[in-house]
């Protein structure tokens, strides 16, 4: 769970994550993980003083969207490699 608020901008997130680890060889392991959740972005435009009060930015805006992140990781004592894709 994450909540961040800076000036008129806000971000709230809730995520669930799962990872699976597999031993490929005595010293080599492979991992795969997925995270899914929801993010809510907000702008409190009503707190701004605008030259034109009819500007659309004067309205409060909220955007809510689902997020999914996946990643793969191959590692050993002497090397590691990985790839991930965030916010699918």
Image (cartoon, rainbow, N blue to C red):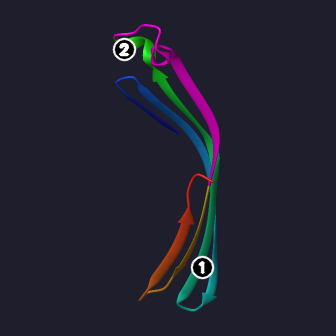
Q: Disc 1 on helix, strand or loop?
A: strand
Q: Nearer the viewer, mark 1 or mark 2?
A: 2
Q: Quadrant of residue 9?
A: top left
How many residues crowd around disc 2 within 10 Å: few (fewer than 14), some, or many (20 or more)? few
* Residue 54 left/right relative to 35: left
How many residues crowd around disc 1 within 10 Å: few (fewer than 14), some, or many (20 or more)? some
Location of the C terminus by quadrant is bottom right
User: Is residue 54 located in the magenta-colored stretch of the structure?
Assistant: yes
Above or below, 54 relative to 62 = above
User: Is residue 61 located in the magenta-colored stretch of the structure?
Assistant: yes
* Residue 25 left/right relative to 41: right
On the image, the x and y values in percent for residue 66 come to 65, 42
Q: Disc 2 on helix, strand or loop?
A: loop
> Label for residue 48?
2
On the image, the x and y values in percent for residue 57 come to 46, 19
Above or below, 4 relative to 51 = below
* Residue of label 1: 30
Residue located at (42% from left, 7% from top): 53
Depth order, front residue of 59/1: 59
Q: Quadrant of residue 30?
A: bottom right
Q: Are marks 1 and 2 in contact (CB under 8 Å)?
A: no
- Which segment is the magenta one? 51-68
Q: Quadrant of residue 51?
A: top left
Q: Earlier in the sequence, mark 1 or mark 2?
A: 1
Q: Could you tell me how far apart the alpha carbons at marks 1 and 2 are, in whole angstroms?
A: 50 Å
Depth order, front residue of 69/33: 69
On the image, the x and y values in percent for residue 48 come to 36, 14
């Amino acid at each position: 769970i994450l909540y961040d608020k800076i000036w008129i901008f806000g971000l709230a997130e809730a995520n669930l994550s799962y990872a699976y680890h597999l031993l490929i060889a005595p010293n080599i392991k492979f991992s795969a993980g997925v995270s899914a959740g929801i993010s809510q972005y907000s702008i409190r435009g009503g707190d701004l003083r605008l030259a034109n009060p009819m500007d659309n930015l004067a309205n409060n805006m909220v955007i809510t969207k689902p997020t999914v992140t996946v990643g793969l990781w191959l590692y050993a004592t002497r090397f590691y490699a990985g790839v991930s894709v965030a916010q699918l």
